[in-house]
């Protein structure tokens, strides 16, 4: 009897899809997420991005939540929204309970990566394709806690030595 219950529990967990939270800034970072069609098809995912009219329209057919747009990082609005997004991230994480966080950045993703890591999530960071020879602030912030860190240009391995080169996502 005990083995029968254990085998049912194993069958339930095997059939359950991996829950993946995908935080991403709007624009090019979000466009790169859509290059991960296999990930989206194979998982129970939730995209979290900046609350803008274009992103709401783009994600109308996807499970999504929205946070404050960060804007330019030299602006006081950036820092205000960056702090607010930490408070918005926690309830999203607690409700969705992801197994993993996959992100292409940028700043909107940082709170999710750190809070998710504290909650036991695996963190997977994909450095943006536009980063050919310079580091990115958000990537550098998440790099120390990332379980996997992928770069799309071979030369970026010098900037992020623990990274894995995967080539372009497209």
Image (cartoon, rainbow, N blue to C red):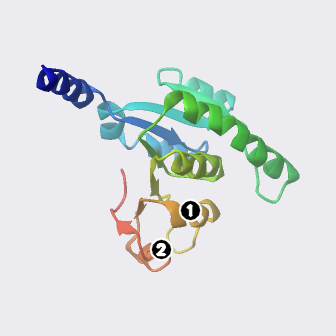
Counting labels gives: 2
Residue 130 appears anywhere in the view = no
Rendered position, 156 above or below 166 = below
Residue at 57% of width from left, 73% of height from top?
A: 134
Image quadrant in which you'd find residue 49: top right
In this picture, residue 14 sits left or right of residue 151: left
Q: Which mark is residue 113?
A: none
Q: Secondary structure at mark 2?
A: loop
Q: Which residue is mark 1?
A: 139
Find disc 2 in the rendering and name its residue. Answer: 160
Residue 156: where, in percent of width, then height? 45, 73
Which percent across, then down, holds residue 166?
33, 62
Cβ atoms at labels 1 and 2 below 8 Å apart: yes
Q: Residue furthest front?
A: 1
Q: Residue furthest bottom?
A: 158
Label 1 to label 2, Cα distance in Å?
Answer: 9 Å
Q: Is residue 140 left or right of residue 156?
A: right
Asked if one can make out residue 156 in the rendered structure from this viewpoint, the answer is yes
Q: Residue at x 46, y 46 (%)?
A: 121
Picture quadrant where residue 37 is located: top left
Residue 66: give x, y in percent of width and height.
64, 31
Residue 60 rendering spot, x and y as whole percentages: 53, 21
Tell me the crowding category of disc 2: few under 14, some 14 to 19, or many 20 or more residues within 10 angstroms, Cα based. some
Quarter of the image with the N terminus in it: top left
- Between 106 and 96, the residue placed more toward the observer is 96
The answer to whether 34 is drawn above or below residue 127 in the figure is: above
Q: Residue at x 35, y 67 (%)?
A: 165
Residue under the image location 56 percent in, 35 percent down: 93
Instruction: Answer with left or right where residue 86 lies relative to residue 170.
Output: right
In the rendered image, which quarter is residue 99 located in? top left
Q: Report the side of 111 relative to 21 (left or right).
A: right
């Amino acid at each position: 009897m005990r083995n029968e219950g254990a085998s049912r529990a194993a069958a339930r967990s095997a059939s359950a899809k991996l829950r993946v939270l995908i935080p991403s800034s709007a624009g090019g970072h979000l466009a790169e997420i859509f290059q991960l069609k296999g990930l989206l098809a194979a998982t129970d995912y939730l995209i979290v991005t900046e609350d803008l009219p274009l992103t709401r329209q783009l994600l109308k057919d996807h499970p999504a939540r929205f946070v404050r747009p960060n804007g330019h990082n030299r602006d006081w609005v950036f820092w205000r929204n960056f702090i607010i997004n930490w408070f918005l991230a926690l309830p999203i994480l607690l409700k969705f309970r992801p197994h993993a966080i996959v992100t292409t950045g940028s700043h909107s993703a940082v709170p999710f990566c750190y809070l998710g890591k504290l909650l036991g999530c695996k963190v997977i960071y994909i450095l943006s394709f536009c980063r050919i020879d310079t580091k990115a602030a958000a990537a550098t912030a998440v790099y120390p806690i990332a379980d996997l860190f992928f770069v799309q240009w071979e030369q970026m391995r010098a900037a992020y030595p623990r990274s894995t080169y995967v080539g372009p996502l497209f």
